[in-house]
Amino acid sequence: MSANLKTRAALAAGIMLGGMTMLSADVALSQSATPGNITGRWSTIANTRSGTLNITQSANGTISGTIFENPLQGYYTPSSRRIVFVRIANGIPFQFYSGWISINGLGLGGQFNVWNISDGAAGGVDYNFSATKVSDFPK
């Protein structure tokens, strides 16, 4: 199975996972009632690890970027503010992130699932994650 097909399968399987939290932020960045584009740099915490989430959104809703310096691929649906993406290492998706963008477009929250042994975590483990937008421009 190709890496691209694995990524798509991982995204499709992970969309069914639930249990998200919401965040709100007081940052002077672009805001709207339904954030149409979430491109930007985000300060994130996943489990207890702090880092950077960089998102670039295409016109069709696909997103790409990095989280903790690993590539990510996924989707964002503005009408529901739903975001899903996989974190990829060595061409293989190993974490699935699922959550929602806050109403003002400056925060996001959700959970991520670890599918294999990586970074000391056992497969199938669920963790919370959150992020606050710090810039409208990734990196």
Image (cartoon, rainbow, N blue to C red):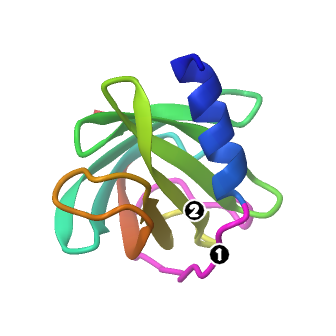
Tag 2 near tag 1, CB within 8 Å:
yes
Q: Position of residue 26 (x, y in %)?
A: 39, 76
What amino acid is at disc 2? Ser
| Residue 18, label in figure | 1
**What's the magenta bit mostly, secondary-structure-wise?**
loop
Mark 2: few, some, or many residues within 10 Å (few <14, many ≥20)? many
Is residue 87 shown in magenta?
A: no
Report the residue marked by disc 2. Answer: 98
Q: Which residues are magenta?
A: 16-35
Q: Position of residue 14 (x, y in %)?
A: 64, 56
Quadrant holding the N terminus: top right
**Residue occupying the point 69% across, 60% down:** 82
Quadrant assignment, res 22: bottom right
Quadrant assignment, res 137: top left
Q: Is residue 48 visible?
A: yes
Q: Position of residue 60 (x, y in %)?
A: 77, 29
Q: Secondary structure at mark 1?
A: loop
Q: Position of residue 136 (x, y in %)?
A: 43, 43
Up-down relation of residue 81 to residue 72 (above or below):
below
**Residue occupying the point 48% across, 79% down:** 24
